[in-house]
Amino acid sequence: AQKVTQAQTEISVVEKEDVTLDCVYETRDTTYYLFWYKQPPSGELVFLIRRNSFDEQNEISGRYSWNFQKSTSSFNFTITASQVVDSAVYFCALSPDGANNLFFGTGTRLTVIP
Amino acid sequence: GAVVSQHPSRVICKSGTSVKIECRSLDFQATTMFWYRQFPKQSLMLMATSNEGSKATYEQGVEKDKFLINHASLTLSTLTVTSAHPEDSSFYICSAPGLGSITDTQYFGPGTRLTVL
C-alpha cells in the first residue's frame, strides 16, 4: 500500500522567510517516484519536481530545494526567501514503479504574508 | 512542455442530469489518462484509469455506472457523471503521462469544477 503524509495542514510565513514543507511516505516498492506539485488558487496543478527512489541527491532549483532521505522516507521541500506568489497548496505525491497513477498527500496550504 | 486541456472548466447542472467532461492531450498521445476528484480543501483522489482501446479501471469505491469513462482516441478521454447529485459536486482533474514513458511526469489538466444543484 502507498501512503503519503503531509502533517502540516497550513503554514503562514512572512515574505522573505524560508519555509520547509514536510513529506513522509510509505511504500513497499523498491522503485518508486516522488513528486511535488503546486496548486495555486486557480486550481491547476503545477509540476515542480520528480525524483526516483535511487537518486538521493538533493536538488536546488532557484529558490526551491528538495531533501530526499530514504532512511527516514522523507522528501521535504524548502522555499528560500518566500514570496507572496508562493502562496498555494503544495502536494507531495508518490508513484510506484510501473504505474502512472499518483498517490497524493493531503497537501499543505502555504500563505506568504507581505 | 506537454499540455493537457479540460472542457468545460466550470459547469453547473441540475440534480438528475448527466455531465460530460473532456480531457485532451494537446501535443502528445496518451494511451492512458487518469481521472481524479478533489473535494474542497482536500487532496486529490484517483477515481479511475482511462485506457485507450479498452475498459477503464476504477478504484475501489468508485461507481462504474455513475462515472462513465470513454477513451475515444489517443488524445481524448471523457468522464460522464450520470444522474448527478449534489454530493457529486467536486473538482475533477485529469492527467496524462507525457512523452509516453510509463514513469514520466504526469501532466494535469486545469480541472473542471462541477456544481450540482
Image (cartoon, coloured by chain):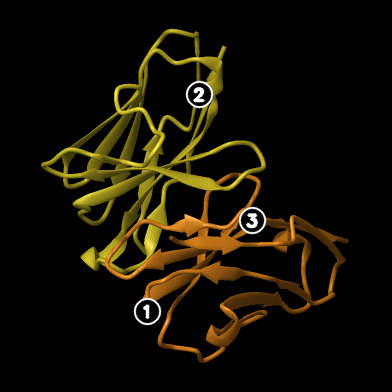
Chain colours: A orange, B yellow
Mark 1, Cα crowd under 10 Å, few <14 / some 14-19 / many 20+, is: few
- Which kind of residue does numbered mark 1 sit on? Thr
Residue wearing tag 1: A30
Q: Residue at x 36, y 49 (%)?
A: B4
Q: Are marks 3 and 2 on the same chain?
A: no
Residue A60 seen by the camera: no
Residue B57, x across and y down, in percent: 26, 42
Q: Is residue A90 positioned above or below B93 on the image?
A: below
Placement of the C terminus of chain B among the 4 image quadrants: top right
- Residue B88: assigned label: 2
Q: Nearer the viewer, mark 3 or mark 1?
A: 1
Q: Are marks 1 and 2 in contact (CB under 8 Å)?
A: no
User: Which badge, 3 or 1, is on the more N-terminal residue?
Assistant: 1
Q: Residue at x 48, y 45 (%)?
A: B45
Q: CA distance from mark 3 to mark 1?
A: 24 Å
Q: Nearer the viewer, mark 1 or mark 2?
A: 1
Mark 2, Cα crowd under 10 Å, few <14 / some 14-19 / many 20+, is: some
Quarter of the figure with residue A36 = bottom right
In front: A31, or A42? A31
- Which kind of residue does numbered mark 2 sit on? Asp
Residue B40, x across and y down, in percent: 64, 37
The answer for which chain carries disc 1 is A
SS type, badge 3: loop
User: Seen in the image, is A9 located left or right of residue B28?
Assistant: right
Residue B63 seen by the camera: yes
Q: CA distance from mark 1 to mark 2?
A: 36 Å
Q: Residue at x 49, y 68 (%)?
A: A35
Residue A69, x across and y down, in percent: 57, 85
- Residue A107: assigned label: 3
Q: Are marks 3 and 2 in contact (CB under 8 Å)?
A: no
- Residue A43: assigned label: none
